[in-house]
Amino acid sequence: MDIYSLLDKRFICSFCGREHYIPIKRIITKKGAISLLSSFLLDLVKGRRVLILSDNITYDVAGKRCEENLKGEYEVTSVILKPESGKRVHAEEKYLPQIFKNAKNQDVLIAVGTGSITDMGKYVSNELKIPLISFPTAPSMNGFTSGVAALLMRGLKITIPVKPALGILIDTRIISSAPLELIKSGFADSLAKSFANTDWKISSMISGDFFCPLPLKITTQAEEKYINKAEELLQRNEKVISYLMEGLSAGGFSIILAGKSSPASGGEHLISHFFDIEANKRKREPFSHHGLQVGLGIIISSTIYERLKGLSSREVERRLRNKKIDYDEEIKSFGKDAPLIKKEFSKKVSILKELPKKLPSLWNEIKEKAFPLVHSSQKIRDSLKKTGCPLCFKEIGVDKSLAYKAIMTSRYIRGRLTILDIASELGILREIAEEFS
């Protein structure tokens, strides 16, 4: 399947029977694509008032050239965000007033950057109902094509549904020249899809909620082109990096197809979000790039899946019958954020209460239909190692006590069921937390 053939088309899914629609109009990926910006806008946007959003790093990488390419034909305003503290700009609510002020009365917003700039750009454009054009400066995450924005608000990392970009213009020369840590981050983030989709499938089997196999099929198809090409990625091979970008785009599409972030963000992402929340509490830079933190979360998820494969339905029933978890006590560890965390967690308490009745009878079916979808723990470790991604929490500056807390409590920060919940309810999560901390 050509995933780009799905753009701006309504179609009935042959897998789930529902109508899907990806509202993104156009994606161009080629060397020197930045020179096409003016004609790209002309094809997609009415009006001549353009806001270019970048930060102090991405402005030098591409924002300034975008500005120069449009001046004369468009009324261009540039907002260059600078870090108020720390080394880099992150997707936080403190930057939003400046963006909103400059975005009013604009005809289009161009987000030039990676995850933070893209997410803030998507949020503002959605709120103001103006189109967004995404210009990635690194193949670092899947948000360029997704219909959600991840932001730190009130100290918590939240995911907000937004309208996706109208178009994405990808210059392979620019993304191939990105810092290697960002390329590694995108690679690690892309590996999460089999785990996120499996979490979603298990949740749907237990709750009866909607599930569609198409998101995993398109991400797996894209992944096959680059997953075994670590050396070429590290050598900045433009063709392989364009394949990685295709995989990340497919991850964004999967969110749109599902109407929620489930097929791109499972338990492994909650561990990364936990670290972002913790770094914000400590008023320090994030421990690492989003995707590299996700990679460590994938190691945890893959270990959980392999550990759970060995359990029989009778053992599952016994463990659930004997479980002793004090949710309120574990939530207290979030301190002043506990009330907000408890409110989010409450969304899945009813499902957790049903597990003793439902999970044992579904267990063999889950093992047969869901578990085979994920990569093995060994494959994940090998893939991350070959691309030079972190393999243990210590490598990103996380000590043993924080690693333990992340594994044990990150499940509380989202209201959707993930493999972290299953592992905790079955008494497996504590064993793994002790092993990895």
Image (cartoon, grey):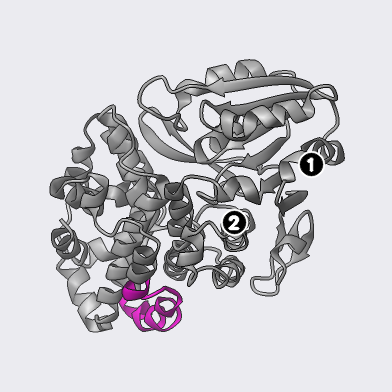
- Disc number placed over residue 225 in the picture, else none: none
In this view of the protein, which residue sits in the foreground, 329 or 39?
A: 39
Verify whether residue 420 appears in magenta: no
| Residue 314 versus residue 195 in the image, above or below | below
Q: Position of residue 255 (x, y in %)?
A: 58, 54
**Foreground residue, 1 or 224?**
224
Say how many tags the image has: 2
- Residue 13 versus residue 208: which sits nearer the camera? 13
Q: Compared to 338, does 27 lie above or below?
A: below
Q: Label 2 neighbourhood size at 10 Å, few (<14), some (14-19), many (20+)? A: many
Q: Indicate the secondary structure of the residue bearing disc 1.
A: helix
| Above or below, comparing residue 9 to residue 170 in the picture | below
Say whether residue 197 is visible: no
Q: Quadrant of the N terminus?
A: bottom right
Amino acid on which disc 1 is placed = Leu
* Kind of residue indicated by mark 2: Met
Q: Is residue 285 visible?
A: yes
Of mark 2 and mark 1, the one earlier in the sequence is 1
**What segment carries the magenta color?**
360-379
The residue at the point 61 percent across, 68 percent down is 218
**How many neighbours does mark 1 have within 10 angstroms: few (below 14), some (14-19), or many (20 or more)?**
some
Q: For mark 1, what is the residue?
A: 36
Residue at coordinates 35% horizontally, 30% vertically from top-left? 155
Q: Quadrant of residue 221?
A: bottom right
Q: Residue 37 placed where, x, y %? A: 77, 38
Task: Identify the residue under disc 2.
Answer: 245
